């Protein structure tokens, strides 16, 4: 093959050249993913069939005991599977009007500026921004201001509400962007046609705008839900460690009780759950998008 | 040489700590802090002239030019390592850890590169069992003095009469109470868990660490801190799960919440208790009359240490009371060596948080190795946190 290339470089057919270029372009990313994603994941799968050594860590074995024990973290799985959809739904409720405003209402000369502002928070680490919320919600923040109007001893930090607030704040841009993109592509003539035919704005919205933006909504929901399934930081900092998710269970198993095989089994299970969520979300998104395309033609 | 060096320091150790605490309280800017303490300049100078300060005084053995130590955050006087380098020519790389478990994992994985490390008492027998540490050659540690050490602390570093580790600092696990918010006067762990459900409802914190959280709950029920008996652990679990809805947080980083008065009561280690009380006198530190934990951190040398000679040299240097006293002043945790106590200023030795009465230490227990590694306790903690 190599000699062939050298001797007959000029004779490469356009197809072969295209394939070689594609391979060259894809190779670095593939190598990176293979070394830093696939290989470690194989190690985790191997670990998940092992045993905890008496002093902690990993001991080679072949047992399904770790997977059989998954029930002992049922509460953490349950919390995660409840939080992730609720968190992304609340995120959606807040994000949709913003995206709608940016894509439809705002005048084009300000649009770029406002869209950039949505992305600006990403310039600072989520950890730092979450710490900022700790101080805003803490006793020297909002509760301190409330004391001036006579409301004493309000506690906002380390409540489920604080965790939800942190989640919506942290993931909002990831929800706004895909919805914004799908709304921006919206054909305005459809809205005019709807109005001409006598539909009121509200029914135009539910009949045309919302369905056409569903692919963006699904992308945003899938993106936020998947990230929330592995969330660790926000419940730890704004929930005071009292709200226990799979991410928190994993940290404890690896760093505190040093039960690596069980931690690996949970990690493998989490990956399976994420893949299922992703497949379902993509299916729905494609079906919705596909159906609409047919209607438009 | 070392005297000249000290004279030229931009700030004294005490001055440094004062400025540092002001920075932490937010009454001084970072720029001002780096300027006044000379830290910015020192960093720049030290990094540009490796070996500039070296005047090898430890003749006889080749110590090399570099070694690394694994230890805890904010646990050393920063000038200690600079002075050691000036005396021996060996630069010390400092690795800090968040837990004994992480330290153990790193050493177990091999090739840690450490020539000295600082494990806590209850991990030493595990390190020994796994063959990760060597018996110490006391002839190379001339500054260590068995006669001025309390056997209470040296004992935990010995296995079968052989010394594997020498004590650094010790301390206790009690609790800190904001006396301006809480009128009751708790004296025991029993009081702690009762108050957490009543007057301190929504304002109490426990550690995110099974050893101390489960241990203290056991003590409040009249059991031993180290119990791994299933029926006693079941009772402790019942208590912890009953208390959980009333807690402010399960978190070992309790200083920010106590300072902001988000939390009014927390499980607390000696050095944190002393720091909180120094800055906010209303934050009292209390040792349970019903029991609790006493701990000691040790110096040990890994079996695979790449530079054992330098490890021993640094250990010997740190055992010199003149150096150990600076470490004590910097980290706030009490010393095990009476020679160091005699060098301390009165305000430290008379501080009842740092040096409690002997009687209040009697009911306290050292954590045991099995307490840390017991899977039953790890699972209990997971159920408590996910409840």
Image (cartoon, coloured by chain):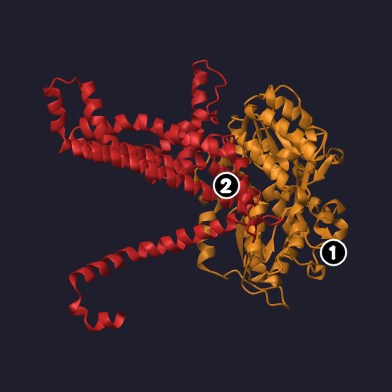
Chain colours: A red, B orange
The CA span between labels 2 and 1 is 38 Å
Seen at 55% across and 22% down, the residue is A154
Residue B289 in percent (x, y) is at 82, 33
From the image, tell me which residue sits under label 2. Answer: A250
Residue A101 percent across, percent down from the top left:
25, 30
- Label drawn at residue B162: 1
Relative to B94, A289 lies left or right:
left
Rendered position, A30 above or below B268: below
**Measured from the top left, where is residue B297 in percent x and y?**
74, 53
* Residue A286 can be seen, yes or no: yes
Question: Is residue B332 found left or right of A175 in the rendered image?
Answer: right
Q: Mark 2 packing: few (<14 Cα in 10 Å), some, or many (20+)?
A: many
Q: Nearer the viewer, residue B96 or B302?
A: B302
Work out whether B316 lies above or below A92: below
Q: Chain of mark 2?
A: A
Res. B238 image quadrant: top right
């Amino acid at each position: 093959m190599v000699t062939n290339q050298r001797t007959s470089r000029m004779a490469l057919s356009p197809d072969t050249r295209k394939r070689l270029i594609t391979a060259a372009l894809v190779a670095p990313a593939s190598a990176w993913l293979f070394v830093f994603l696939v290989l470690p994941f194989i190690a985790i799968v191997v670990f998940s069939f092992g045993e905890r050594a008496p002093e902690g860590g990993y001991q080679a074995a072949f047992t399904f005991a770790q997977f059989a024990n998954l029930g002992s973290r049922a509460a953490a799985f349950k919390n995660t599977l409840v939080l992730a959809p609720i968190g992304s739904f609340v995120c959606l409720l807040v994000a949709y009007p913003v995206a709608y405003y940016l894509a439809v209402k705002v005048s084009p000369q300000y649009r770029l500026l406002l869209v950039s502002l949505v992305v600006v928070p990403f310039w600072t680490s989520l950890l730092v921004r979450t710490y900022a919320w700790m101080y805003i919600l803490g006793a020297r923040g909002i509760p301190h201001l409330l004391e001036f109007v006579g409301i004493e001893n309000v506690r906002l930090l380390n409540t489920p509400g604080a965790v939800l607030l942190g989640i919506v704040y942290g993931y909002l841009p990831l929800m706004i962007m895909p919805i914004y993109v799908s709304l921006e592509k919206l054909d305005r003539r459809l809205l005019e046609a709807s109005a001409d035919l006598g539909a009121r704005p509200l029914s135009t919205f539910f009949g045309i705008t919302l369905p056409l933006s569903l692919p963006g909504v699904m992308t945003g929901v899938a993106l936020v839900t998947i990230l929330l399934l592995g969330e660790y930081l926000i419940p730890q900092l704004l929930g005071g460690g009292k709200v226990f998710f799979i991410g928190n269970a994993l940290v404890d198993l690896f760093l505190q009780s040093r039960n690596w095989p069980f931690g690996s089994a949970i990690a493998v299970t989490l990956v399976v759950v994420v893949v299922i969520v992703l497949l379902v979300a993509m299916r729905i998104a494609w079906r919705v998008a596909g159906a609409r395309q047919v209607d438009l033609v | 040489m070392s005297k000249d060096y000290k004279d030229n320091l931009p700030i004294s150790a005490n001055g440094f700590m004062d400025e540092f605490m002001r920075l932490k309280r937010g009454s001084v800017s970072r720029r001002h802090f780096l300027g006044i303490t000379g830290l910015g300049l020192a960093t720049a100078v030290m990094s540009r002239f490796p070996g500039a300060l070296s005047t090898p005084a430890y003749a006889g053995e080749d110590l090399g030019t570099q070694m690394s130590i694994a230890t805890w955050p904010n646990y050393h006087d920063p000038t200690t390592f600079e002075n050691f380098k000036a005396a021996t020519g060996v630069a010390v790389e400092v690795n800090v850890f968040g837990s004994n478990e992480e330290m153990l994992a790193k050493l177990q994985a091999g090739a840690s590169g450490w020539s000295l490390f600082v494990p806590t008492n209850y991990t030493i027998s595990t390190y020994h069992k796994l063959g990760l540490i060597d018996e110490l050659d006391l002839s190379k540690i001339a500054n260590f003095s068995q006669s001025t050490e309390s056997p209470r602390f040296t004992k935990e570093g010995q296995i079968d009469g052989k010394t594997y580790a020498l004590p650094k600092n010790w301390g206790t696990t009690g609790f800190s109470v904001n006396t301006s918010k809480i009128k009751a006067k708790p004296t025991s762990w029993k009081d702690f868990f009762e108050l957490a459900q009543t007057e301190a409802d929504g304002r109490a914190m426990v550690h995110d660490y099974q050893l101390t959280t489960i241990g203290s709950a056991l003590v409040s029920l009249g059991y031993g801190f180290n119990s791994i008996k299933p029926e006693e652990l079941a009772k402790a679990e019942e208590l912890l799960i009953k208390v959980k809805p009333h807690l402010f947080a399960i978190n070992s980083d309790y200083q920010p919440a106590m300072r902001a008065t988000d939390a009014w009561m927390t499980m607390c280690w000696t050095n944190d208790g002393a720091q909180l009380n120094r800055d906010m006198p209303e934050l009292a530190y209390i040792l349970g009359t019903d029991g609790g934990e006493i701990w000691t951190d040790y110096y040990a040398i890994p079996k695979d240490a790449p530079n054992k000679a330098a490890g021993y040299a640094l250990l010997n240097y740190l055992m010199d009371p003149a150096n150990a006293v600076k470490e004590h002043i910097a980290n706030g945790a009490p010393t095990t060596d009476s020679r160091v106590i005699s060098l301390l200023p009165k305000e430290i030795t008379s501080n009842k948080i740092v040096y409690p009465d002997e009687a209040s230490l009697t009911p306290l227990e050292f954590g045991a190795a099995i307490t840390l590694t017991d899977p039953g306790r790890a699972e209990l903690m997971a159920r408590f946190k996910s409840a």
